[in-house]
Image (tube, rainbow, N blue to C red):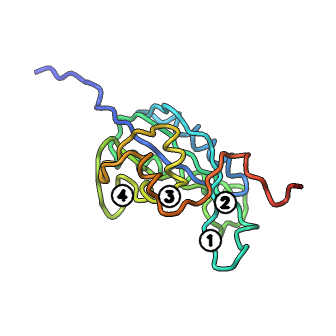
Amino acid sequence: MRRFRGNKKRVLAYIGLESSAPDRVAYLQQAVQMLKFINLIELLDCSSFYETEPESDSKAGANKDKIWPVTAVTAIETALSGDELLEVIRDIESRLNNVDKENGRNTKGASENISLELLLFGNETLSTSYLTIPHPSLATRASIIVPMLELAPETVHPQLNKSLAQIHADLPSLEQVLLYGTRKSELQDD
């Protein structure tokens, strides 16, 4: 019996990117480029880059000197399984987070350069010890929802049965999420 090799079913997936490194935009750009060159992944789109208000400290004004993380979301189509895609994402993270080590810098105790998260994988829902789809932050953080709204505002959260636009409107409080380059720095003159 002859077996035909057909294409695996392709799935639309969304990957969130976030960096708080001093050269955070460069890390996001590198991650997007790395995704482009992975077999079985087609990069469909990438949102604009956004700066996100850092998490609050209890002291008033403590966020003034903190780096605002830069976030973005990519839309991809892939024939990889969710587990395989997660492996690719973790490999990209590992490579980019080890850049300073390769350059001979001591990164002990340093935060990660970049974080990549699988936000949605088709309409699948999954909860294991290492992967939850849809990503839990997709329903709670404006820093993830805002870039997703740029790419797919009518996308419905598979568990909440609400569009991302509805979820965004229902958030109890919003951290500031600004298009990269539009935030007025405290260091700029008035």
Q: Which mark is residue 162?
A: none
Q: Nearer the viewer, mark 2 or mark 4?
A: 4
**What is the spatial separation of the Cα atoms under label 3 and label 4, in whole angstroms?**
18 Å
Q: Which residue is mark 1?
A: 56
Closer to the N terminus: mark 2 or mark 3? Answer: 2
Q: Which residue has dot 4 on it? A: 131
| Picture coordinates of residue 168, whole percent (x, y) | 47, 52
Tags 3 and 4 touching, CB below 8 Å: no
Query: What amino acid is at disc 4?
Result: Leu
Q: Secondary structure at mark 1?
A: loop
Q: Is residue 12 above or below residue 64?
A: above
Classify 10 Å Cα crowding around label 3: few (below 14), some (14-19), many (20 and above): some
Residue at image position (68%, 52%) is: 24
**On the rendered structure, is 157 left or right of 187?**
left
Assign the C terminus to one quadrant of the image.
bottom right
For label 2, the residue is: 101
**Which residue, given by chain and number where applicable, does mark 3 sit on?**
141
Where residue 127 appears, x then y in whole percent?
30, 59
Foreground residue, 153 or 67? 153
Answer with mark 1 or mark 4, whichever residue precedes in sequence.
1
